[in-house]
Structures are given as structure tokens and as C-alpha cells.
Image (cartoon, helix red, strand yellow):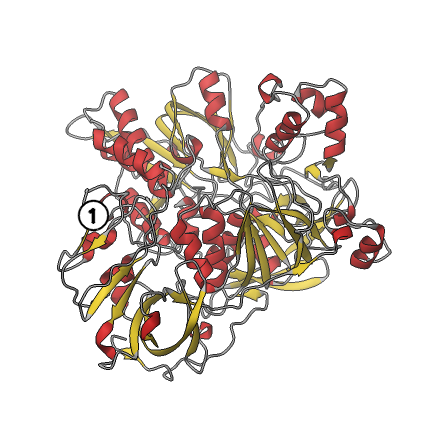
Amino acid sequence: MSAHRPPTGTRTGRAPDRSTGRLTRHPILPIPSDGPTVDFRFGRRELSARRGEMISSALHAAGIRIFGRHHRDGRPQGIFCVNGQCSQCLVVADGRPVKACMTPVEDGMLVEPVYGRPRLGAHDSLGGFAETRSAERAVQVLVVGGGPAGISAAIELGRAGLDVVLIDDKPVPGGKLSLQTHTFFGSIADCYAGTRGIDIGTLLANQLAALPSVRVWLDTPAVGVFSDKVVGVVHKGRFLRLRPEVLLVAAGAREKVLTFPGCDLPGVYGAGAFQTLVNRDLVRPAKRLFIVGGGNVGLIGAYHALQAGIEVVGLVEALPRCGGYRVHEDKIRRLGVPVWTSHTVLRAEGRQGVRRVVVARCDERFRPVEGTAREFAVDTLLVAVGLAPVNELLAKARSYGMRAYGAGDAEEIAEASAAIFSGRIAGRTIARDLGRKVGVPQRWSRTAAVLRSKPGPDAPDEILELDRPVQPIIRCWQAIPCNPCTQVCPLGSITIPDGSITSRPRFEGDCLGCGRCATICPGLAITLLERDHDPKRRTAVVVLPFEFDDTALPASGRIVTTGSRGEPIGRGRILGIRDRSDQDRRRLVRVEVPWADRLLVAGFRVQKPAEGKPLPTADQLALSPARAKRVEGSKGRPPAADDDPILCLCEGVRRGEVVAAIREGVRDFNQLKASIRCALGGCNGKRCTEPILQVFRQEGVDPKTVARGTYRPLDLEVPLGVFAASVEPEGFRAGEGLSGEGDFAQRTQGDAPFDELWAPPAKDAKGEGKVSRRGAETQRGTKGTTGKEGGKS
């Protein structure tokens, strides 16, 4: 539609559906009307799932959040990372314990909750042995990780004609790009600024598919780096030993954890897990959620939740200001999400899952301030307190003297746009080190440094009104790397005077009112002012960018307008909506406002801000026995009543146990493993190491003096039958081909003989390596629903 639609139009004003289950509408992502499904059972319940859907997503779509009970104390278990980096979601599928977030549902599958420790099947069998020819093969470059950094590096390596194998443990390429429905910052030419992450993933994947010397193996995890400089991977149910000349690790990042009473309850999980459920699998896992952490991950997660029709009750950040981009923070404030800085979470409450969250103001040492606690009724608590590099394989490879490089978040945590440049630089560097005549432009390093930079200080909130019929109002108050608005103005009226991408853009000159700046701005920080709407100057029109469907708009067309920081301004009336294909799923809403409000209005609410319930002083920082009984009832131990939070969720080790060991003189992680079983669970210490080091610090022990645990393969669980070269071991069906949408033509190896998988590169006329296509087949992705993404950034 190209015209402004009147507010009555097709806009129904229906309240958004806040039930859990599957999304039936989304303003950015296409919702498949029909598609192939499979039937399975969870215990005694008969359920259905989309073909290729992970068990965890299918269960959440059915409203099931508890996947089992912990072996130590019977605590309910649910998801946390949905990235294979922990073991919270363990279930038994067809008799085998598996991670629900990494295992697709299959037709007729029996999924059972895990009560205690899962048992080996009583009648397990290999099913036969394959001929065990030499399973070790050499490759010039092995890239671990198919996110923005890994793909960008592989593109540069492939353009240099190198023999490359890129592996990723997910069924589709792109990493976290597949979860990022928002538009990117930076510049258009360098990193696709103004384009949505899901679409950038497809663009990069298509470039990769055009390179014949690059082989891409999906559903193929790297499970270990060994002292003989071999990398072990599992591909299509077979264990392969790859000997790369150069190893590039671009495995992304994992979410950090936060320990507090109730942090182990179902419904407490990472913001990345939430985005996976919502944006990849189109599942609505919550009705009312709360977020801890004001970085970009938490702020964007709040926005994605609102787009999915989920009420965001609030967000807390322990620092005096949010660490993410201010445009992200302002955007959710304007929509009605309260943001409390210098606040932290005290506890989550509930018996079988999160029912309430209690937060309070904290001082400069992050200690709760008495008398400031508030309680909010929620069913989900998202933890977005930062990311940690997935770099164990990189560290081990370097310790063995391998030629190993890192890129993206595995090397340094930054935005996905920075990861793209990090991958490009790593790819060119490796190609040069392997003798290719390529250079690394110095500009790339400078650009990467700018994209990795933290947000700068805020500029004064000043708006200059010009004597023009129409003009853009730019509310970009913070120094961040972004300039697409300057590149799309047809008159060149938006400029950055000093030419720096981190400086604030300025409007000078004339305006056509085309709205291109408002539709491309990644922070939705540009609006338009139409001053000549009312000759008598009683009202004016502001044009606001909007990325929601009609259910977010009232049927009356009357809205509560908000200012730059979300403060209420007054009332406005929707006159029409411009919704055109060239706006890339962003709509422009024309709103009539009083003349006095014309420079103040920056948005409008889609929900009413929650205030929470102040707690009596006696209930502020701990649960009194009376409150514990009122909150949880009389049966069983209420998780939230325990002031000794769990640090090691896999093994159920509490903080008090770690403190006791430290006070007894323990200064070695291996001693903690042996004595109280810390870091012995399915995550291999990935989640609990950092919280335990924080306890050492709190106990007066410098973490640098603590001996770290010995890292040993395997990096994740692998069925024993895989090592015995069994024939398609039951319960591990990796490498089924490409999933995802778009034009990415994926070369997979199908069922080709083992030797043909490793046909040596043919030589072209210039003597450069060129991979043979013998035994390979080209497939176009059809599995999945959103044009995929995946890694951590």
C-alpha cells in the first residue's frame, strides 16, 4: 500500500493476543499458514511440532516449561540458553538423553522428562559397524562457527581460492543474525546499515554459496582439539578428525548467568534463548516478562517481546545508566516499558516456575538499598547481563602450538557489524599467511575499532525548528557508529559536519517529506514534523516510525503520546498509516497533536507502564517465614525462600558450599570438582566458572591466584556409537541438509562415500585449489520459517 490509510481502514484495534503458544502474527516475520508437521509424545501427552523444530520449542509451544526434575533435590528444570551451552533442557528422546534445544522432533518420537539422572538404555546396540577407514583428513583452513564472523572470513578465504571447510552446530548458517529482526547500525556500504539482521544473514550466505572452494557442513559441532593438532568433529553421525593447516574459531559467545534466589526456576532464561524461541521458532513463551540487564541484548530483547505481543513489565540495570545504545533504550521507554537504572533483582519467586520477581535500588557497590524493593507479577525473567566468548577450542589450539586465529565474539565481544569486519580481517590475514597475494586494508581495522567502540556521552537534547513546511526531527543524542540517514536523503540535507560516523547527524536545507530517513534509521530516532497541517497553528502532524501490527493500535485512533525518554506528553489522533514495500516492514504513522506538543512528541505507548507493588520493610531483602508460607504454601521447600542461591545449576551446588570450601583453603577448581562437584555437569563449567570466581573475589581471594580447571575434550555430549563408526547411530541424526529461506544454495555431502567427501581440490588453470563437486549435491533451503541466523554477538 502506498497511500496513507485512514485510522478506520483495516485496523481493528483488537487487543494483542498475550497467550502463550505459537505466534499467529508478527510485524516483521512471515507466519507460515500451513506446513509439514510431525506427531510426538511428551510423557502421556500427544503433541505436534513443525518439521525440523527443536524439542524445546515444540514443548514451549504446547505450554510445557518443565522438562524434568534435578537429580539432587528434585527442583523443576527448564531451558536457559537454547544454544547447546548448558544442560538445563535435558530430556530423554526415544530412550536417549539429549539436549532439547539441539534435538529436532521426529515423527513418532517419544520424549520423556528426566527425573534424576538419565539412565542408559537397557537394550542399546550399535546396529552394526561401518568400515573404519582412516577418518583423518587434511584441510587448508577449518572455520568453526557459521555466524557473521565465520561466514565473512570464509568468503575472503574462498575468494582467495583456499580449500575451506566451515562447520556450524546449527541447522542453518548465519549465527545470531537469524534472530535479529532489527536493522543494523554502521554504514550502508561497510556493514549493511539499515538492513535487518535476518536479511544480512541471507546476503552473506548467498555470497558464501557462490564460492566453489568452500564446503559448509551444518549440524556439525566441533567436539575437541587434541594435542596432535587435530580437531574432532561430528558430521552426519560420524566422528571425523580434521587436520587443518590453519584453524579459525568464530564460535560466537554464550550468555553470562546471574545468581540470586530463584535463579534456577523454569521461566528464568537468557535473552538470547527468548529471541530464539520468538524470532526463529515463532513461539510465544511468555505473557508477562521482566528483564535484567540494560545492554543492547536486553534492550533489543524487550523490543522483540513487544513485537510478539508480550507485555514487558520492566527492565532493571545495576549501573547508573544502561550500557546499550540510548536509541534502543528510548525506543522501549516510548512504547511504555519502564527502565530502572541503579536497580537489581533480589529474587524470583514461584514453586513450579516464575510467578513474581522482586527488584530493588542498589548503591554504588551494587548492594540493595533497604526500603526500595518492589514486587512484579510475571511469568518470565530474562537474564541479559553480558556475553562471554566461546573460546575454549581456540585457547586449547594455541596451547598446542596450532596456527589458530579467533574472530568475532570468540575474540572480542562486540556488535554483529563489528564481527563482520573481524571475520573479513581474519580471512585476509590467513590467506596472506598461506601465501596468497592479498592485503588487509588499513581502513578495515579502523572501521572495526569504531564498530566495537562503546556508546559515547549524551549530547544535550536540543531540537532546532526550521521555517519549513516539513522537516525531520533527529533524536540521536549519543555518539554511536551510524550514518545511513545521511546516505538516503535525496537532497543531501542530512549531513555529519565533521565526517565522523560516530558524530550526530544534522539537518540543514530543504525536505521533501519522503520519509526515507525515518524508514532507514536503525534506532527509530527520526520523525517528521508537518508544520502546515493547520493554518491556524492549533495542531500539527508528526510522522512516527512504527514496527507493530494493527493490534497495537486502538480502534479509536486516540493514543497517548510520549517524549524522547518515554515521558507522557499528551494525546494524539492517528490520521493514517503509510505502509509501502520500500519501507522494509516499517510503517509511518501520521499523528495529529496539539501545536505546543509538535517538538516534544517522539512516539506513543503500546502498553501501560507497570509500577509494581512496594513490599513491607520486613519483606524487603529476605522472605520472612510468614511471607514464605503465604507465597509458596506449606508443602515443600520454596525456592525463593532460600537465600543460598545455586551457582552450579548442572550439579545443584549452592553458594554456601563454595564459600565453605574457599574458607577451608581451596584455591583450585579441580579441588572444587573433586569435593563438591562444581563444573562436572553437562555444561563442562561454562556457566558456573565466572560466578564461582566472583565468590572467590567476594571472599577476598584474587581470582588470578585461583588455578583454573583442566579443560578436556569432549566439549559436548557425543553418543559412544559415533566413535565406533556405527552406521547412522540412533538418536544422532545430524547433517540433514539446509534449513532456512532465501537463495542460499548449500552444498551438502548427502550420503556420498567417505572418500568422496574428501575429494582433493582440483587444480584450475592457475594452479589454485578448486574443490571438486563430485558427490556433492546442491539444495535450496526450505526448512525453518524465518530466513536463518545464529551465533552470538
Answer left or right for 674 relative to 572.
right
At 49% from the left and 69% from the top, the residue drawn is 24
Residue carrying label 1 = 496
- Whole-percent x, y for residue 420 in the image: 32, 39
Along the line of sight, the residue nearer the viewer: 368 or 431: 368
- Whole-percent x, y for residue 244 in the image: 39, 24
Residue 555: image quadrant is bottom left
Answer left or right for 462 relative to 406.
left
Relative to 391, say whether 398 is above or below: above
**CA neighbours of label 1 inside 10 A, class few (<14), some (14 to 19), many (20+):** some
Q: Residue pushed farthest right?
A: 634
Relative to 239, say whether 538 is above or below: below
Task: Name the quadrant of the C terminus.
Answer: top left
> Can residue 733 be seen from the camera position used here?
yes
- Whole-percent x, y for residue 605 in the image: 46, 68
At 49% from the left and 36% from the top, the residue drawn is 221
At 51% from the left and 72% from the top, the residue drawn is 16
- Whole-percent x, y for residue 663 in the image: 75, 22
As shown in the figure, which amino acid type bears the numbered disc 1? Ile
Answer left or right for 339 relative to 418.
right
Along the line of sight, the residue nearer the viewer: 196 or 178: 196
Along the line of sight, the residue nearer the viewer: 736 or 508: 508
